[in-house]
Amino acid sequence: MARGARGRWLVYLLGCVFVMVGTRLSFADPIVGVGPTTVFSLGTLVRGLGVYARLSQGENRLTVWQAPLLAVYSPRRDLNVAVSLPYVSKELTLEDGRRRGAEGLGDLSLFALYRFFRQDRPLGTVEATLLGGLKLPTGASERSDAQGRLPPALQPGTGSVDGLVGLTLGSISRRWGLYLGALGKLNTEAGGFKAGDTVSYNLAVQYQLFPDWPTPELSQLNLSLELVGTTATRDTVLGASVPESGGTEFFLAPGLQYFLGPQWIIETAVAIPISRGLERPLGLKPDVIVVWGFRGVF
């Protein structure tokens, strides 16, 4: 998987790290993109997440599984701090039948989320949040197989210290939720390779289909639709730009969120590419992304 794809998956995972739930909210934040909601004061968020991605070109096929372990704590009402450590599995199957890949713990990420604006309205809220963090090189980045050292795109880690910064906006009412978000990732060089910087942006709409379903005041079903895009600059190797990298792509992601009660949610979304202009080695293009998991606060 090329740098643009790897960056996109990290951005998606970061977005899911910041998918927070408040106490008795009618909506949770977007499933794939980033959202502005912070955990209530002195709250703790648990998040179980799985991300599956498949990319292909002709007979070449890449599958990526990621499962981050997340811990989020709120020392004050408008501030969250979080840590994420994913388990990563990547396998590239070439048209000649050869397989290459690796699995293991990925890179540790540290985050902060600060809500700087909130305005409560009758049956609704408008809020805006800044977020930032660092990705640290804890994952292996020098794995090899029988064919030699694996390329950066197939390593569990990147070997680089990367920065993240973002802004999210949200408007929540009785039956509708509307979210806008952007998250940038600034990469550094490691081992002569520098991944291109990325910006991920999303527009999400949620609709409360069953306000009290099937048990009054205990459960709820929401429908969501997200438009997610990523723009990446070109990778560089030993200071030279890589032509087969960089670009822009968009996904449309319908999803479901089911509230088991006032503090627990299970959810899933399927992201389908609608524009595939992000360049990767072997001409690989995304076929599908599937995100699923649960979250809760206590």
Image: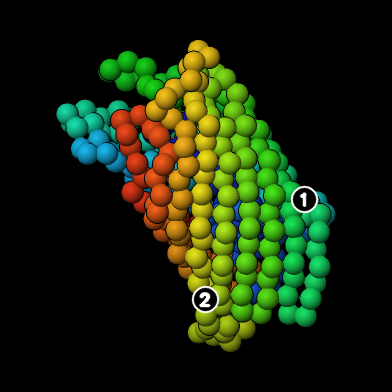
**In what quadrant of the picture does the N terminus appear?**
top left
Image location (x, y in percent) of residue 223:
50, 72
Q: Residue 59 occupies which quadrant of the picture?
A: top left
Residue located at (73% from left, 80% from top): 123
Instruction: Identify which residue, 77 or 181, lies in the foreground.
Output: 181
Is 2 left, or right, of 266 in this rendering?
left
Front-lying residue, 222 or 274: 274
Question: In percent of the image, x 68 and y 45: which residue is there?
Answer: 166
Residue located 37% across and 17% down the image: 149
**Residue 149 in view, yes or no:** yes
The numbered dot on residue 189 is: none
Q: Which residue is label 1 attached to? A: 114
Residue 221: which numbered mark, if any?
2
Q: Decide: few, some or many residues near mark 1? Use Cα within 10 Å; few <14, some 14-19, many ≥20.
A: many
| Residue type at the position of mark 2 | Leu
105 sits to left or right of 203: left
Residue 140 percent across, percent down from the top left: 48, 25
Dividing the image into 4 quarters, which one contains the C terminus? bottom right
Q: Position of residue 291 (x, y in %)?
A: 45, 55
